[in-house]
Amino acid sequence: MQEIYNAIQTAAIKIDYAIKHEDKGYSELQNATGDTQLKLDIQCDEIIEEIFSPISSIKELASEEKEGPYPLHKNGKYLIGYDPLDGSSLADVNLSVGSIFGIYENDYSGKNLKAAVYIVYGPRVEMVTADSDGVKMFRLESDNTFTFVQEITLKEKGKLNAPGGTQKNWSPMHKKLIDSFFAQGYRLRYSGGMVPDLHQILLKGGGLFSYPGTTDVPNGKLRMTFEVFPFAFVYEKAGGEAIDGTKRLLDLSPKHIHDTTPCFFGSKEEIKKVRNAYAND
Ligand code: AHM
Ligand code: MG
């Protein structure tokens, strides 16, 4: 696993450079979800593919930017589902973006996730790892090494609310639930990048991030394999919870690697309220 973490660090340094200095325009291509890919999306995917390719413990890659799985070493132990540059359009407006990695065994179901890692490219470059040792944050230093900063644990209850999805397409129940958090004094924190938004909630001790099913996207926007399961794993290891409204996210399995799901990540108190609201709908 350490070899994979080291490879992610190497990729992160190159991706950070690409974000800051390379071509920001759109390509002529679309990904499997139908998004027009930025040149940066493709470049970051290629950086990761190249760095992961020689690692013999990796059996296969599945990328948000690739149509299907990409086989590497047939005797490898791990499958890696990743989003090379999440929230990539935010780079153009100089907001933080991220890379997300789920390290699986056997298949891409939530229960087979063994570790999760994400990188935040912001004013600082930070890496968060979640595994049987808990959740740890590292920061990129001027000598291009990552040093340990702190362990991350969530409090029982937080103060931040990051409500995703187009509001006019929320269900009345979901709107009432989100309004109820603001009525209790929760503060809005939503940049439109799930990596910095979820990172902020983790570092500030708690809160709620939601991306519900809506009338336009009934299964939500965020993909299980590359985005949702890795963060569900991080939140659970940090002492929080992650559900789709009623069910634990890590009990789900995608039928197709690009499948999406409604998702809620938070500290225990907020998730309890979400579960009650969705159970009684
Ligand atoms: P992307 O993988 O195409 O970048 O989309 C994922 C991003 C998430 O980071 C973020 O939470 C979500 O899309 C925001 O969506 P919206 O613009 O609908 O709020
Ligand atoms: Mg993404």
Image (tube, grey):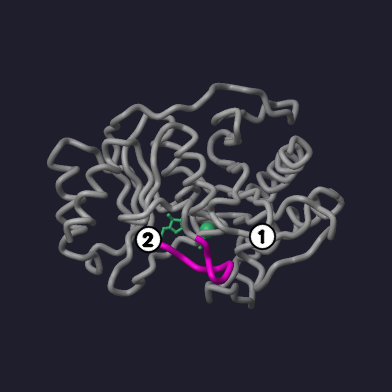
Point out the image quarter for the N terminus. top right
Q: Tell whether position 258 is magenta.
A: yes
Considering only vertical position in the picture, is 235 above or below 112?
above
In magenta, the rendered stretch is 253-261
Residue drawn at the location 40% of the way across and 53% of the way down: 192
Marks 1 and 2, the one that precedes in the sequence: 1
User: Which residue corresponds to mark 2?
Assistant: 262
Q: Tell whether position 260 is magenta.
A: yes
Mark linked to residue 107: none
The rendered magenta stretch, by its main secondary structure, is classed as: loop
| Residue 187 horizontal/vertical position (percent) | 24, 38
Q: CA distance from mark 1 to mark 2?
A: 33 Å
Residues under numbered marks 1 and 2 in contact, where contact means CB atoms less than 8 Å apart: no
Amino acid, disc 2: Pro
User: Which residue corresponds to mark 1?
Assistant: 23
| Residue 268 horizontal/vertical position (percent) | 32, 36
Residue drawn at the location 43% of the way across and 42% of the way down: 198
Amino acid, disc 1: Asp
* SS for dot 1: loop
The image quarter in which residue 75 lies:
bottom right
Q: Is residue 199 left or right of residue 155?
A: right
Q: Which is more foreground, mark 1 or mark 2?
A: 2
* SS for dot 2: loop
Mark 2: few, some, or many residues within 10 Å (few <14, many ≥20)?
A: many
Considering only vertical position in the picture, is 221 above or below 146?
below
